[in-house]
Amino acid sequence: MTRCLQLARMGEYYVAPNPMVGALLFDAEGKIIAEGWHEQFGGPHAEVNCFAHAEQRGYRDFREMTLVVSLEPCNHYGKTPPCTELILRHRPRRVVVGSLDPNPLVAGLGVARLREAGIEVVTDVLRDECRELNKRFFMLHEHHRPYVIQKWAQTADGFLDRVRQSKDEPVLRISTAVTKRIVHKMRAENMAIMVGTRTALLDNPALLNTHWAGRNPIRVVLDRKHVLPPDARIFSGDAETIVYSDNTEWDFVLRDLAERGIHSLLVEGGATLLETILRSGVYDEVHVEVAPEMTIGEGVPAPRIALRGMPQQIDGRLLYEWREEHGEA
């Protein structure tokens, strides 16, 4: 199962909103003979790729083999046929599953169908690790909202930026070239990225993923007063942009994003939006980058929250990361 999790992560930047899944086959002697993973959204599932790999290697008889898969095989038609049908055609002796699938279209039905057909099924092998890998997918289907990550960079004396009145005034550059790549990695890991009106106006960000592998996130912006110009960079390029104007309440935004199938949201600012979300209590992780030798004396205050844990030190910056276990309002 550990190997399945390694395989699953190969699809990390390409399968959302589907889960990352890995699969392998081993024979009666315990030798792994084939592997596969879900490689891209809309493409073949891990089980399909695994059996295809085995057939490419000349294997045809799977009756004494064991299929190991990190997530319950699907039992419904979506963009691809049910994986349970494929498994029943090949009839492995046993199927080992890391975690049941929380999607109501699956939710134990895949395991039940295999057992009804006489295949031995073992479940919950490294269950916690399998759920952690797909924490965004599980959040969407179990709590009907995206997994929310807040991220900001601040000076040593606790400011996000100087006070600016115009986009012509340069933004304070806190991140380095190295830590900027880490931010773009986070953009690739999450389906959507969000900023508030003032950040969209003053920083005029494109919010694209240009420094890491993977797709661009869906851009989300609040514009309660309809002040964003159509030529703002947040509307540029091929990436989708969602604008909330008439209703910008946090609970509504989360519900609407979930209805759109968006399983994760990276919030990059600004200060008012970050504070609003912190007060709501409905978020899951916080990532803070601190420039330990940079002070400006006054400016836009960073969110008022105690930094937790021992930070990583990368390229002269301190990176704090922690999870909020409360998660739900």
Image (cartoon, helix red, strand yellow):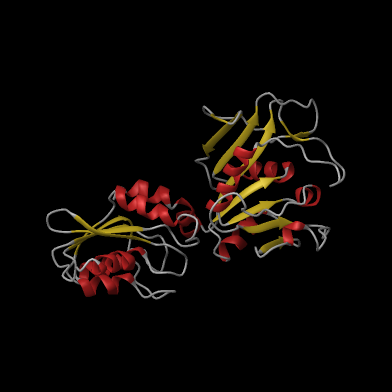
Between residue 209 and residue 138, name the one nearer to us.
209
Residue 9 on image: x %, y %: 41, 52
Kindly indicate the quadrant of the structure image that contains residue 75.
bottom left
Considering every residue shown, the one lying at the far front of the view is 57
Residue at 78 percent of width and 40 percent of height: 171
Residue 247 seen in this snapshot: no
Residue 228 seen in this snapshot: yes
| Left or right of residue 38: residue 228 | right
Residue 105 on image: x %, y %: 40, 69
Residue at 80 percent of width and 32 percent of height: 299
Give above or below for 148 relative to 59.
above
| Left or right of residue 166: residue 290 | left
Residue at 26 percent of width and 68 percent of height: 56
| Left or right of residue 89: residue 6 | right
Between residue 202 and residue 242, name the one nearer to us.
202
Kindly indicate the quadrant of the structure image that contains residue 55.
bottom left
| Left or right of residue 307: residue 121 | left
Residue 95 on image: x %, y %: 23, 61
Give above or below for 238 relative to 307.
below
Residue at 19 percent of width and 68 percent of height: 59
Between residue 131 and residue 239, name the one nearer to us.
239
